[in-house]
Image (cartoon, helix red, strand yellow):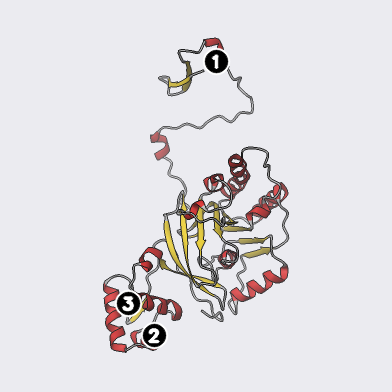
Amino acid sequence: MTDHKTTDPAGGWHHTAGPDVEPEDIVSVPHHPLARKPIIMTTTELLAHPPDQLQWAVTGLLPTGLALLAAKPKEGKSWMALGTVLGSGGLGPADDRPALYIGLEDTQRRLYDRVKKLLGDAPRPAGAFLSCDWPSGAEGLAELDGWLEGHKGTRLVVLDTLAVFLAGRDRSRDVYQADYEALRPLKKLADKHGCCILGIVHVRKEKASDPFNTLVGTTGVTGCADAVLVLSRPRCGTEAVLHVTGRDVEEQRLALRWHPDGCRWEVAGDAGAMITLTPERREVVEAICRIGPCGPAKLAQEMGKNPDAVKKLLRRMEEAGTLVCERGVYHVPPVPGVLPVSPVPGVPV
């Protein structure tokens, strides 16, 4: 049976029978009293009501809605997520809005050790809340809804891991549909409360040319998310790349640096730009990221190089836009849209 859709002058859809369809074959669906009616507007009406400004948990990376952070086991994604909640050693600084970290695979001892290591001697963020004992499934979702009701203005909720939080989801249906439907309640909850819910997920062992195709599950997982971040770090390596994509997020690749002493992540710059640097210039960027903004003399001492040669190289890198110089102090320019991470007192970098 062939079915065709056409529009009437009023702009609505109605069905017309194809050449092999009799009119009596078309089934009329009765109106359900509880059915939600669609909201339709003209372009004039739409543009007459500008939406509220998009809110961010981390500027340029984690917008309001559902986000996913994926990586292989033991690559540092939990440290990154926890550091983002604390505003120390994660993807960006914290503010005075509440943030909640739910470590469903953590013990209280492990959570204690990690928070202590990330914060060092820095002030304890009053807006950071932590839990390693949270129900899963529908009960967990209801508890989270209630918590968000009681903590208005929450910027970020981390579910580590998402699979544990979603335990017991229906796998009897189409796998893609099951993945998508499992995440929809979280997406709706994030939109309802105007916060970012960040789910921590794993990637498959099989490699793929597109890092976003490595997430465990079907494309229903990534299809429901507003932002997807994939962390790629060699085993025991200190350098990594964070692949970022999303509906309201600029697609980008960030170069990250892992500081094992403090278990902290640092945004080093644009990964594409870092890759194209010569080894000599890359060494300069890495040294500045390691010791912080500095003058030519201190940098030459750190690198064990001739001060005059370093000074000339710094000037060339400034002209190329790789470095910024302010009053004789050189630093790596921040990545557009991403707030720089400030060093934390008492924590080695």
Question: In the figure, residue 6 lies in which quadrant?
Answer: top left
User: Is the residue under label 3 in contact with that under label 2 (CB below 8 Å)?
Assistant: no
Tag 1, which secondary structure? loop
Residue 112 x/y as whole percent: 68, 72
Residue where numbered disc 1 is placed: 26
At a point 53% along the width and 77% down the height, the residue shown is 344
Q: Label 2 belongs to which residue?
A: 303
Q: Percent x, y for residue 94?
A: 54, 66
Q: Which residue is label 3 attached to? A: 325
Identified by mark 3, the residue type is: Cys
- Disc 2 versus disc 3: nearer the observer: 2
Q: In which quarter of the image is residue 162?
A: bottom right
- 183 w.r.t. 325: above or below: above
CA gap between label 1 and label 3 equals: 72 Å
Q: Disc 1 or 3, which lies upstream in sequence? A: 1
Q: How far apart are marks 2 and 3 (CA)?
A: 18 Å
**Location of residue 119 with respect to 272 vertically, above or below:** below
**Observer able to see residue 9:** yes
